[in-house]
Image (cartoon, coloured by chain):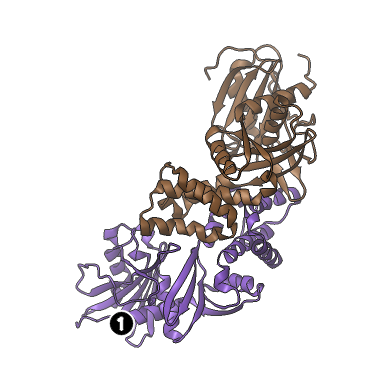
Chain colours: A brown, B purple
Amino acid sequence: MKNKPVSPDWIGVDWGTTHLRAWAMTKDGDCLAEVKSDRGMRGLAADEFETTLQDVIADWIHDRVVPVIICGMAGSRQGWVETHYASVPCPAVTAEMVFPKVSSPGISVSIIPGVMQKLPPDVMRGEETQIAGFLHLNPGFDGIVCLPGTHTKWVRISEGLISAFRTTMTGEIFDCLTRHTVLRHSTAGDGWDDDAFATAIGDAISRPERLATDLFSLRADSLLNATPPDVSRARLSGTLIGIELASVRSYWLGQSVTLIGAEQLCGLYAKALASQGVEVALSDGRKVTQAGLFAAFLSLKVPSA
Amino acid sequence: MKNKPVSPDWIGVDWGTTHLRAWAMTKDGDCLAEVKSDRGMRGLAADEFETTLQDVIADWIHDRVVPVIICGMAGSRQGWVETHYASVPCPAVTAEMVFPKVSSPGISVSIIPGVMQKLPPDVMRGEETQIAGFLHLNPGFDGIVCLPGTHTKWVRISEGLISAFRTTMTGEIFDCLTRHTVLRHSTAGDGWDDDAFATAIGDAISRPERLATDLFSLRADSLLNATPPDVSRARLSGTLIGIELASVRSYWLGQSVTLIGAEQLCGLYAKALASQGVEVALSDGRKVTQAGLFAAFLSLKVPSA
């Protein structure tokens, strides 16, 4: 690790399934340095989390105990310790964090719990921190937030609480269909066609019941009409995002929606929503994650060094 | 190869993506012997098909030229030779077969072409032979045939012709979701729950637009309520078959449907259709494939030995 020689007041970590990002932070919420690693939750046994963390943040630990605040899949059943879920309606981040035992004297670790919904059953881990950050940066916000990703979250915020949410697997299903099914022959590469995407969005929203036959049509169309993979790829994405919008219609119909996440993916959701007359705002994913970890830091009773 | 020492009048081969089955047949359509192999189209380069075939049928070739009639993915773009598609409306098997050059003097090879539909775009390879066999065994049939499988075909037969058809990827998508996505944690094993399947069928047919959120609910439900994998697995299958039925409603609503294929999978489709008040008949997949190859053999101008 060749990090800048910084002395953070605390460290924030977004520890997902495939990656982790750590930030050296000041007590005012400014970021001094960042480390990225591909040592995500998926590749680690429960007893490997602490040593992995120590490797990643070694240059930031000196002569006093530094609080480390973690969000994401590190708190899942397959993670470091399984944290509980707060149940909606609830604040995005509660003070009830989980403190795994650590052998290192230089850090104290807190893991942010997830959020659950009983009916319809749903869970989130990590996005609650982004929502907390968004609310920290936009106090008084009331309305709909959508966090596109491998699993996209649609979240209703009311009076500062998460009141309801739904998850779709659109990103993971797109990935899965383009890698592991016959559609991989028709959607190769990373090309794109905006018109095909827009048409597919409209078709899927108005006739979601045609999904099962629409998918194989992509393959047949490329065989019979030599449709380019760029078109098929965009059409598949539009079909799946359209089906998603049909599923969560009550979250966006007649609403404005704030999208939080990576720029490119949020751009697709923005186009899809705009085509349905929905007003869209964008918010940077990394910034709100940092702000959410900061909100958790502020809620923490920091042990005196 | 340890086959019975038989001398067939002709040989029928069902050469699919992952497997092939060859039958030693008499000129009256009786089966003398069978060989199964896992040397499907997917693992073979174009120049490996003839040697693979010769390996498989070596014991059946003696002192005269034996016609070999092949159906399935061996005729696809990734296969031995790409055969054309007959265009609906058309007979299931035409006499216009494709004859790849072979170096062996003991065989003459014919590959049965697929069938295509221009709008909505669709293709089949292999199922046309099963349909031909079904019509050979049930002359005068008029109505709907469904061939459940990795890719399920819904086929309208009218006046002895395939008049229209649709393909769904339900089997492949089920396989893909239970192997490659987060749902694998919730659907492990091969258990089953009939009630969960039936409920999911009804829900998906009546509200297909909820698919995108229903899928992740399976995962959340297993995390929050410890729902057993048997239930989640059956529910996922019911959801996907229900979405399929919603997509091809015009094929079964107010119709009776003949299911052709493997017993277990046809059983699921039979239950799903029966729950919608549809009358169902079953037809054995292997039997109709043999009969379809036989119908193709009868249509062939056999070269004199």
Whether residue A176 is visible: no
Depth check: A160 or B71 in front? A160
Vertical placement of residue A233 versus A43, above or below: below
Determine the secondary structure under disc 1: helix
Label 1 crowd bin: few (<14), some (14–19), many (20+), radius 10 Å: some
Compared across the picture, whether B255 is left or right of A292 comes to: left
Residue under pointer 1: B299
Residue at x 43% of width, y 75% of height: B162
In depth, the one of B261 and B36 nearer the eye is B261
**Residue at the image point whose x is 67% and y is 63% from the top:** B206
Whole-percent x, y for residue A44 in the image: 60, 36
Q: How many marks?
A: 1
The residue under the point 70% across, 23% down is: A294
Q: Is residue A91 above or below residue B219?
A: above
The single residue placed furthest to the front in the displayed view is: A277
B148 lies left or right of B69 = right
Quadrant hosting residue B200: bottom right
Q: Chain of mark 1?
A: B
Check the picture and name the quadrant holding the C terminus of chain A.
top right
Observer able to see residue B264: yes
In the image, residue B164 lies at what x, y percent? 45, 71
Decide if residue A85 is on the left or right side of residue A168: right
Find residue A68 and report its image quarter: top right
Residue B194 horizontal/vertical position (percent): 68, 67
Q: Amino acid at mark 1?
A: Ser
**In the image, residue B256 lies at what x, y percent?**
57, 79
